[in-house]
Amino acid sequence: MKPNLTLDPAQIIATIERLENRISDRFPDSGLRKICSQFLDVAVHTKENIEWISKPNLPLRFISYFVILLGIAGLFFSIKYVEVELTNTSFTNLVVLAEAIFNDLVLLGAAIFFLVTLESRIKRKRALKALNDLRVIAHVIDMHQLTKDPNIITSETSTEHSPKRTLTTFELQRYLDYSSEAAALIAKVSALYSQSLPDEVVVSAANDIETLCTGLSQKIWQKLMILND
């Protein structure tokens, strides 16, 4: 029997917290530390979201099933008390009656579909909003590492509007490494949503974030390779 392998939100949060502490120790006033701190808050909130998404919404289900049963009972009640004149069973009247019943069935089916999928759509909306927050954090981390050029370590050749370059080679290595770790953890947090809610739209959004973070990590590691060479 294969083990049930799942991502543990608590372990991911602990890893993000360690990363935030490491960044704080080495770059306490950096923008990377601030965005990582915000990322930690989002991850903690993600754990709450995952717990809420994983649990069935019993009150909503009860109301939905009650309304569905009420609609079905109402349909049978209306059909039962339809008076069909035996002396007036023309083809036209039968067509009109069949059309009315068909319309009722279509409306009832649409109502049932709406109520049955209501819970998943509410959870999907909440998950997509959280995934969008993670996407924004990934872009912000990308912005912070854009000026970390491995070919320029000091400010000796800087122009008036060049960004300040105060990091040593070792510090720049650590900064880029932290940025890559943060990007990888963003992908892991987004995967928690696709794990708890295997909805097609949510899974696609989580995969997009993973692709974004993979591309970001590749750019960072290219800089690290240049820096090491």
Image (cartoon, grey):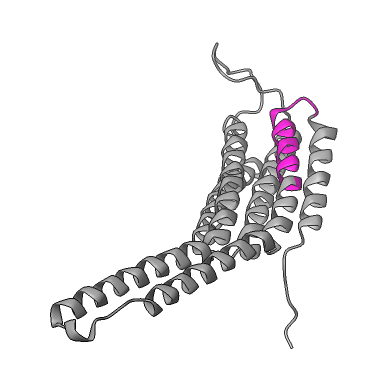
Q: Is residue 106 magenta?
A: no
Q: Position of residue 8 (x, y in %)?
A: 77, 62
Q: Position of residue 61 (x, y in %)?
A: 62, 64
The image quarter in which residue 134 lies? top right
Tell me if I can see residue 150 in this picture. no
Image vertical order of residue 217 relative to residue 9, above or below:
above
Q: Position of residue 30 (x, y in %)?
A: 73, 27
Image vertical order of residue 106 relative to residue 86, above or below:
above
Q: Is residue 37 magenta?
A: yes
From the viewer's side, name the closer residue of 52 and 222. Answer: 52
Q: Position of residue 67 (x, y in %)?
A: 54, 64
Name the main secondary structure of what is drawn in magenta. helix
The image quarter in which residue 190 lies? bottom right
- Numbered range of the magenta stretch: 28-44
- Which residue occupies 55% across, 51% down? 125
Tell me if I can see residue 197 in this picture. yes
The furthest residue to the bottom: 1
- Which residue occupies 41% across, 70% down? 109
* Quarter of the rendering occupied by the N terminus: bottom right
Q: Is residue 152 left or right of 81 when viewed as pictured?
A: right
The image quarter in which residue 99 lies? bottom left
